[in-house]
Amino acid sequence: MQEKPTNLMGYYVPERGPAYRFFEQLWDDVQEGRDPRFKKRLVENAREEMWDVIRAIDRATYPFNKALTYHIFGGISDMMSVFLIEGNLIQRDGIKERATFPIDITREEPILYRQVSDNETLDDKITIEKTRVALAHSGSALRKRGYVGFEVVRSRVFYASESELERLAEMGDFSFVPYIAETELLRGLESPPVPLWSNYPSGFNADLVSRRDKGYPEGKIMDRLKRNERESIIDLVGTRYVGEEERVKKLSDFFESGGETGCSQMLGKFQVEVLPFGKNRFADPEKSGFQNHKLILRVSGGGPRFVSHIRELQLYTWVAYHQSEINVRSPYHHSRYKEKQNRPARIDGLLGFYLPYLEHVFGHENKGRNIIPIRGK
């Protein structure tokens, strides 16, 4: 049986290449308590190799998700693509207030994702561009209310049927319907510590697909080092499908139709191989009944522009999504087990000397780029 990669980026970079050797040396030096001693040439070559990986992901992002949504929903004519920017509005006294900017990119998404990225992912680049546009349109009103800046936390793209969203919008005042599971309507359904699956109102949901790139993988790698965990990270880019149980299980079966992980399937023009390291809670549910399926996919084919790369795919029923993402009292809420993905608030001792090297390899030296000032006219 194939073993999990022990290199911190083993799923993404070839063995014995410069990036692989950089992360091997990083691990060894931290274990031995040594100061950083990387050779400049190794660091620069590792940076270039990592950006080859990120560019490969960027090139396939739009066509892969188009193929996935078509497979799930079929030829729906009113499929929408909505770019949701999440972050914090900053007041003059420094107080932060959570906010989101939903932007319809249905018509321009193919153009946006044909851009060439330099040293940042296309999702990062588009997030900053779209945030600036959104703030420019509402800057004067926000300044009058005392806001001086916006801190970008993350962005996601949602795919859902426009007619379904309109139907749901008539049920209540939602700031953004594809994000319906975070509205007050469902927050009021928080269950006791033992999930009450039968009480979940599935009629309030529209099936949707969301995806996002990992904006700051350095944070996850630092967490791995702190906890002495050597396994490779798996989610430089992740896609999540949330839907009704029958449709979600059907998609799960499609990816594992060979009976075992390690099989491959055609998704549009892409060949998708399921690596045998994900957790299928549909086949092996938790004792409570909690079910989801996390898959690690090797995606290849699709045409001469595309290079084989790794993507994570998460499949959730709406019940499981509510318990893992919304219901803070659920034993399955992500805060109970999810690794912190933002910049570590405190980096202990020696690890702080390694962070600049990691940021350089991933192209994130400009630490203040996620704060955008709000200007009035």
Image: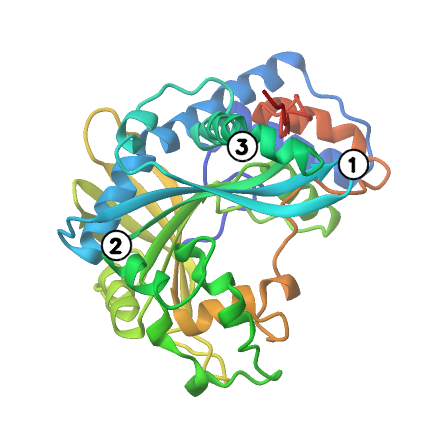
Who comes first in sequence, dot 3 or dot 1? 3
Q: Secondary structure at mark 1?
A: helix
Q: Residue at x 47, y 77 (%)?
A: 290
Answer few, some or many: residues within 10 Å of disc 2's Cα (few below 14, many 20 plus, some between 14 and 19).
some
Determine the residue positioned at 36% across, 75% down: 202
Cα–Cα gap, marks 2 and 3: 27 Å
**Residue beneath label 3, please?**
138
In the displayed structure, would residue 72 be above or below residue 361?
below
Checking the image for residue 218, the label placed there is: none
For this view, does 63 lie left or right of residue 156?
left
Q: Position of residue 107 (x, y in %)?
A: 26, 33
In-image side of 129 versus 191 (left or right): left
Write down the quadrant of residue 206 in the picture: bottom left
Q: Residue type at mark 3?
A: Ser
Residue sitting at 47 percent across and 23 percent down? 51
The nearer-to-camera label among 2 and 3 is 3
Q: Secondary structure at mark 3?
A: helix
- Report how far apart the C-alphas of labels 1 and 2 lie in the structure: 46 Å
Numbered-mark total: 3
> Which one is nearer the viewer's eye here, 236 or 242?
242
Label 2 sits on a secondary structure element that is strand
Report if residue 149 is visible in the image: no
Decide which of tag 1 and tag 2 comes sooner along the chain: 2
Q: Nearer the viewer, residue 180 or 319?
A: 180
Q: Position of residue 262 (x, y in %)?
A: 31, 56
Q: Residue at x 71, y 25 (%)?
A: 356
Q: Which residue is mark 1?
A: 351
Q: Which residue is mark 2?
A: 161
- Determine whether, in the image, residue 130 is placed left or right of residue 245: right
Residue 344: quarter of image: top right
Gap in angstroms between the C-alphas marked 3 and 1 = 41 Å
